[in-house]
Amino acid sequence: MRKAYIAGKITGNKNYKQEFQMAEDKLKEEGYVIMNPSFMQEGFEQEEYHHVCMAMIDVCHEVCFLPSWVDSKGSHLEMGYAKGIKKHIRFL
């Protein structure tokens, strides 16, 4: 089964939960198992979230970027990491 991580802007994006959920629903229809970082608990430091997200990327076959990724420092880090470990990259 294909596994995908969803990347996009969370911090400062009031609609992030809906955007990530729509992407998750679409990918599930395509047969993917999803790692969706929008469901993590609030209250951790940004660097702690990055650490967890990199581990989520590690276990997925590909990283799917929402359009909002271009405005997200964290998503740029995820892009660099995904490229560095040669994950398949997809733009939604």
Image (cartoon, helix red, strand yellow):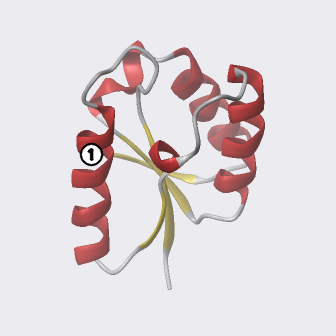
Image check: 17 left or right of 49? left
Above or below 64: residue 51:
above
Mark 1 is surrounded, within 10 Å at the Cα level, by few (under 14), some (14 to 19) or many (20 or more) other residues, namely few
Image check: 45 left or right of 73? right
Q: Amino acid at mark 1?
A: Leu
Residue sitting at 23 percent across and 43 percent down?
A: 18
Residue sitting at 61 percent across and 64 percent down?
A: 60
Residue sitting at 69 percent across and 34 percent down?
A: 49
Q: Nearer the viewer, residue 81 or 75?
A: 75
Q: Nearer the viewer, residue 43 or 3?
A: 43
Tally of numbered tags:
1
Question: In x, y percent, where is residue 19?
Answer: 25, 41
Question: In x, y percent, where is residue 36?
Answer: 47, 53
Question: In x, y percent, where is residue 81?
Answer: 69, 36
Question: In x, y percent, where is residue 91?
Answer: 33, 43
Above or below 16: residue 25:
below
Identify the residue position indicated by label 1 in the image.
Answer: 92
Image check: 76 left or right of 50? left
